[in-house]
Amino acid sequence: MRFTSEQRFDDGVLEREFVLGEIPGILWTPAPASAPAPLVLVGHPGGLPTMYPRLAARARHAAAEGFAAATIELPGSGDRPRSAAADQARADLRRAVRAGEPVADEVVDRLVLPLVDQAVPEWRAALDALLPLPGLGGPVGYSGGVISIGVRLAVVEPRISAALLFAGSYVPRAIVEEARQVTIPLQVLLQWDDEGNDRQVALDLFDAFGSAEKTLHANMGGHTGVPQFEGDDANRFFARHLK
Amino acid sequence: MRFTSEQRFDDGVLEREFVLGEIPGILWTPAPASAPAPLVLVGHPGGLPTMYPRLAARARHAAAEGFAAATIELPGSGDRPRSAAADQARADLRRAVRAGEPVADEVVDRLVLPLVDQAVPEWRAALDALLPLPGLGGPVGYSGGVISIGVRLAVVEPRISAALLFAGSYVPRAIVEEARQVTIPLQVLLQWDDEGNDRQVALDLFDAFGSAEKTLHANMGGHTGVPQFEGDDANRFFARHLK
């Protein structure tokens, strides 16, 4: 991992861009404290340059509670090489949605499963690189982003102690099955009237999670309309489980 | 309304038992403040003597945030005269549940609709009696209890500005339809694995509410296992809407 730029904000948060091999990423650390900061991995749908304002806002909100935050670009997004197969699957999905047709399971599988298979080892490699840094340490949380990536990470990565998942993308049936193996505390956000999302699959996924502590927060406001108070509640969720 | 007893707790909260006609009730008011306290109506499934410890805990938790709280006994419960028809409907419901059979809509209707029809005017009469009291005033919230009573109150009682509802009892289909008329901010608690409750009806009810701001919080832990953190969040919900 190599840092490529840094800036410090008025609130004391240090933002550092890095590359991990060919993968761009960003690390935000709160003003130095006596104890190492727990780390929240900030998920997103892909495209760091576009997503940056929202990601930085989430990270600085977490930093205000003493958490470090980090993200990396997803395969095929932002400045990373595109995948012809993923582009084709995305086009097929959009065509079905525009035509008002149900999205075929095989289209969802073609779009999401290769992404999960490639992204999850990258996020784990990012953890390997980030956790030894000075000021970082302690338990790790995963927040938001492509929910199928969060599910797989929660299953395979023992350093992740709690996850706040956003049920806002299509989920392969295989991932719903995989969710039965998840046992860490979860908070799942669902935008109830999100037209680009299958509400019933989201509810099936929530039902499938094996965690003894799992909470579903459903709100109105469309895909991008998650209420402000959920940001505060995300901090409280991570404070309960990472501190 | 006539007060029949009072006690003051260490935290400054004044608890007063009262009767409203033949209906017993309890009022909790926080330590006197400069502004009138918003009032939270504390719902319950019926049976004040049995429910008292939990109700008092919820009321004092609300009082710590500056809210007054009040409750009244439900028709047919506690020390009030029983209803033979309601007892029969309850027995029919229990028989179906024990036999593992679906509970017939007409049983739910017989149990819940007369209760709603009788209880709602009583809670409105309680508001008439309570709101003029010194130290009370401002907007009113409704919290918990038989959800069908909460739905009807939210439709017909304009003094109620926000409601935190507990989806933990059988809901007549007519009440699901009535819910479309609700427009106040709502937070709905659902215990996901509550075996004495129909999860799909609860989700249909949440979907039906006409409110632009409605939030569903689903948790694990069975009917009585609502997590502690939901109590704190209930205060934050009312603080957003009653202050």
Image: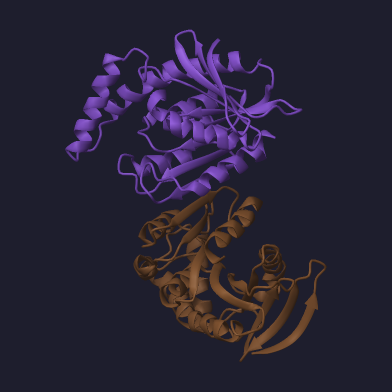
Chain colours: A brown, B purple
Q: Is residue B174 left or right of residue B60?
A: left
Number of numbered labels in the structure image: 0
Considering every residue shown, the one lying at the far right of the view is A10
Residue A172 sits above or below residue B143 on the image: below
Q: Position of residue A243 (x, y in %)?
A: 57, 65
Q: Is residue A145 visible?
A: no
Q: Residue furthest top?
A: B21
Residue occupying image coordinates x 39% and y 17%: B75
State the residue in front, B91 or A118. Answer: B91
Q: Position of residue A107 (x, y in %)?
A: 43, 71
Work out whether A6 lies above or below B47: below
Where residue B16 sits in the image (x, y, percent)?
A: 55, 20
The reply to whether residue A97 is in sight is yes
Please determine whether, in this image, residue B75 is positioned above or below residue B196.
Answer: above
Of residue B223 and residue B118, the one placed in the foreground of this image is B223
x, y percent for residue A150: 49, 70
Q: Residue at x 37, y 20 (%)?
A: B78
Which residue is nearer to you in this view: A179 or A105?
A: A179
The N terminus of chain A - image quarter = bottom right
Determine the residue positioned at 44% across, 45% down: B226
Question: What residue do we see at 66% from left, 78% from top?
Answer: A135
